Amino acid sequence: RRDGSSGGQNGMKNIIELSGTQNIARLRIGIGPRPAYFEGKDFVLSKFTPQEEDLLSSALQKAKAAVLEMLAKGIDQAMTDANKKES
């Protein structure tokens, strides 16, 4: 994402406040839907399940590729490529 609000995320809110601008590119790695039995903060701060740990390496590799592409080709191309649906 090129810029925008914190979306309620406290870490991003703090970065925006400290920098004085919302014009901050960011890469978001999704965590999936929150199960009904979890409070939001408890879900975000909980340990990964074994199944989630199996997915983590792939997610981090995709994030790394997106950041490198952003640096090489710009944020618009990186966003286009990172958000393509895999078939």
Image: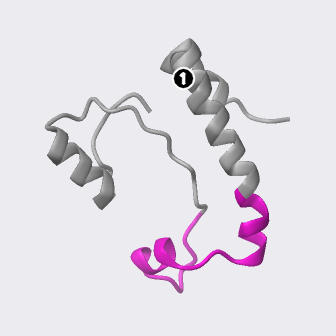
Q: Nearer the viewer, residue 15 or 37?
A: 15
Q: Amino acid at mark 1?
A: Met
Q: Residue furthest top?
A: 73
Quarter that holds the C terminus: top right
> In the rendered structure, does residue 55 fall within the stretch colored magenta?
yes
Q: Position of residue 64 (x, y in %)?
A: 63, 38
Magenta-tinted stretch: 33-56
> In the rendered structure, does residue 79 fall within the stretch colored magenta?
no
> Mark 1 — residue?
70
Q: Is residue 79 shown left or right of residue 50?
A: left
Q: Residue furthest bottom?
A: 37
Q: Position of residue 37 (x, y in %)?
A: 53, 86
Quarter of the rendering containing residue 72: top right
Q: Residue furthest right?
A: 87
**Secondary structure category for the residue under label 1:** helix
Q: Position of residue 18 (x, y in %)?
A: 16, 46
Q: Is residue 83 shown left or right of residue 10?
A: right
Q: Position of residue 23 (x, y in %)?
A: 27, 29
* Vertical side of 36 occupied by 21: above or below: above
> Residue at horizontal 58%, vertical 77%?
35
Q: Nearer the viewer, residue 8 or 17?
A: 17
> Residue at horizontal 33%, vertical 31%?
3
> Residue at horizontal 49%, vertical 40%?
27
